[in-house]
Image: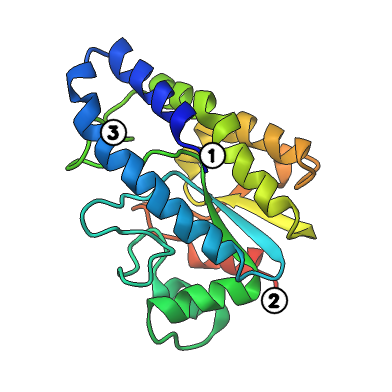
């Protein structure tokens, strides 16, 4: 994927918010993360025969440990624990690679709405420190160059009965109109009412919600 448009949008964001002096250093990390994350994501997409479930997330924390759902070298986090999938599928999962393989096998794909792997250590801003309006602007401006490009890639593999859901209720609250419009335009869903979420208090996955969604 091309990072140049996202880079310009981020540059403008830093400039508008008086933190342009941090841009070059932050962008060195963000651009490298962008390419590594998307290489993993597209490589994983090739392993999925049919996308039946689309989990909508924010962006990986990444960082020095390269923490990401599709990085088999890093541990699962509260974003989606191995035990969550074990509960849903009623199986034992050996490790992270095994977890990824099972997700692929059932047609579950995680897609991020933002191209920027912001966190508290590598960037001056993160998704908790910026305002809701700043967050929406950042995602909306990068939307055609990131999220929509990924939707196009997935569209060739999507099931006719694909189910889309947000990982976090707060992300659904902020971005449902934008995300649902795109999913409708690309014929993933027919109505925004079809999109649910699987979060519960404390950031963890609601195992019962996701079990109801994943009709296997």
Q: Earlier in the sequence, mark 1 or mark 3?
A: 3
Mark 3 neighbour density, 10 Å: few (under 14) some (14–19) many (20 or more): some
Are circles 2 and 1 on residues that touch, CB within 8 Å?
no
Along the line of sight, the residue nearer the viewer: 215 or 97: 97
Which residue is disc 1 drawn over?
A: 172
Circle 2 — which element? loop
Mark 2 neighbour density, 10 Å: few (under 14) some (14–19) many (20 or more): few
Which residue is disc 2 drawn over?
A: 216
Q: Position of residue 173 (x, y in %)?
A: 52, 34
Image: 25 above or below 46? above
209 on left or right of 49: left
Tell me the quadrant of the picture where the C terminus can be found.
bottom right
Q: Give me the C-alpha separation between circle 3 and circle 2.
A: 42 Å
Mark 1 neighbour density, 10 Å: few (under 14) some (14–19) many (20 or more): many
Q: Is residue 169 visible?
A: yes
Image: 50 above or below 173? below
Q: Earlier in the sequence, mark 3 or mark 2?
A: 3
Circle 3 — which element? helix
Which is closer to the viewer, label 1 or label 3?
3
Q: Earlier in the sequence, mark 2 or mark 1?
A: 1
Q: Residue at x 60, y 71 (%)?
A: 47
Q: Position of residue 142 (x, y in %)?
A: 51, 29
Are circles 3 and 2 on residues that touch, CB within 8 Å?
no
Q: Is residue 118 visible?
A: no
Circle 1 — which element? helix
127 on left or right of 23: right
Q: Residue at x 52, y 55 (%)?
A: 198
Which residue is disc 3 drawn over?
A: 27
């Amino acid at each position: 994927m091309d990072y140049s448009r996202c880079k310009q949008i981020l540059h403008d964001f830093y400039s508008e918010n008086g933190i342009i002096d941090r841009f070059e250093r932050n962008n060195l990390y963000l651009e490298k993360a962008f390419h590594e994350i998307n290489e993993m994501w597209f490589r994983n997409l090739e392993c999925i025969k049919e996308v039946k479930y689309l989990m909508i997330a924010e962006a990986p924390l990444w960082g020095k440990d390269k923490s990401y759902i599709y990085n088999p070298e890093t541990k699962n986090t509260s974003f989606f624990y191995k035990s969550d999938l074990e509960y849903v599928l009623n199986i034992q999962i050996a490790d992270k690679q095994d977890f990824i393989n099972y997700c692929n096998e059932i047609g579950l794909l995680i897609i991020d709405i933002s191209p920027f792997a912001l966190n508290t250590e590598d960037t001056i801003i993160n998704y908790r420190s910026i305002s809701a309006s700043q967050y929406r602007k950042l995602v909306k401006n990068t939307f055609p160059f990131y999220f929509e490009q990924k939707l196009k890639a997935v569209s060739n593999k999507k099931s006719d009965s694909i189910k889309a859901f947000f990982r976090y209720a707060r992300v659904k609250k902020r971005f449902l109109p934008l995300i649902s419009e795109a999913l409708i335009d690309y014929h993933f869903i027919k109505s925004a009412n079809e999109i649910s979420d699987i979060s519960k208090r404390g950031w963890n996955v609601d195992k019962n919600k996701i079990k109801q969604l994943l009709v296997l």
